[in-house]
Amino acid sequence: MSRTGWIMGAIAALALASGCGKRDAETHAHDSEPWAVTSWGERYEIFAEAAPLAVGETSKSHTHVTILDGFAPLTEGVVSAVLIDSTGATSVFTQPKALRAGIFSIEIKPQVAGTFDLVFRVESKAGSEEIRSGRVEVGSHDHPGGLVEAPARPDAVTAVAVAAGGDPIGFLKEQQWRIPFATEWAQSGSLNPSVSGPARIRPAAGGEAVLTAPLDGVVVEPSLRGAGRVARRHRGEPASPCHLGSELRRD
């Protein structure tokens, strides 16, 4: 082989090795992506964000807990993440104190690889409840796992609502908790084209609100029908003042 051919072969081998290393890194990065799940119970809503799951490694789950009665963040209580294997054996990871209002940082350190049912257990003054939150996979350091099956929908929900185009808009739980807010499963149904209700018109700061009457004046006679008509009275009745854009006449 010539010197030139040897050099070209070495370059090709280096390029191939570099490409394989890059693909392996990309695959590992993809496998290591964080995961999240949202689930509902009768008393609580759970939104958990967690690092990938690997045997013997700690995955922190920032678990957001909302009390459905009033849609307020849970500030005091005990929140646990429970992994249940196919035999019913459980691994429980508990956080007895909120990191801040509504958020409990749970350290999940699984000891066995495999697929597990995920349950969040909440105990507080608002009541105790276990919220089923789908299924997760625990992998290895090189190939960690995450959420593999979303929680089941309520029986009343027949289909998942899908947005028609557009980009999603972030609406964090910390933002939701600051305003009157609630979440519900989307369902098929009918809506009234309009609704009626009381209202009050107030001018904006530094502005004004003007309401204009369609007639120039105040109508007090029931017999009057429009602008320019003559106000009449029966003999013996007192005259009623009226101005409708023309001179008042009396017969």
Image (cartoon, rainbow, N blue to C red):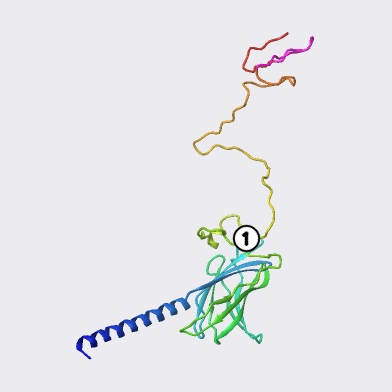
Please name the residue that numbered disc 1 is placed on: 183
Quick one: which residue is furthest to the bottom in this view? Answer: 1
Give the vertical position of 117 relative to 67 (above or below): below
x, y percent for residue 18: 33, 81
SS at badge 1:
loop
Quadrant in the picture for residue 21:
bottom left
* Closest to the observer, 206 or 198: 198
Count the labels in the image. Answer: 1
* Closest to the observer, 102 or 58: 58
Q: Is residue 62 left or right of residue 132?
A: left
Most common SS among magenta residues:
loop
Callout 1 environment at 10 Å: few (<14), some (14 to 19), or many (20+)?
few
Q: Is residue 195 left or right of residue 12?
A: right
x, y percent for residue 167: 50, 59
Quadrant in the picture for residue 195:
top right
Quick one: which residue is furthest to the front in this view? Answer: 1
| Residue displayed at 20% across by 88% down | 3
| Residue displayed at 30% across by 83% down | 12
Give the vertical position of 221 relative to 185 (above or below): above
Give the vertical position of 219 relative to 2 (above or below): above
Quick one: which residue is furthest to the left in this view? Answer: 3
| Residue displayed at 71% across by 21% down | 225
Give the vertical position of 28 relative to 39 (above or below): below
User: Quarter of the image containing the C terminus?
Assistant: top right
* Closest to the observer, 140 or 31: 31
| Residue displayed at 49% across by 74% down | 34
Q: Is residue 230 magenta?
A: yes
User: Quarter of the image containing the N terminus?
Assistant: bottom left
Q: Is residue 190 magenta?
A: no
x, y percent for residue 171: 53, 60
Give the magenta part as a residue range: 228-240
The amino acid type, in three-letter code, at marker 1 is Thr
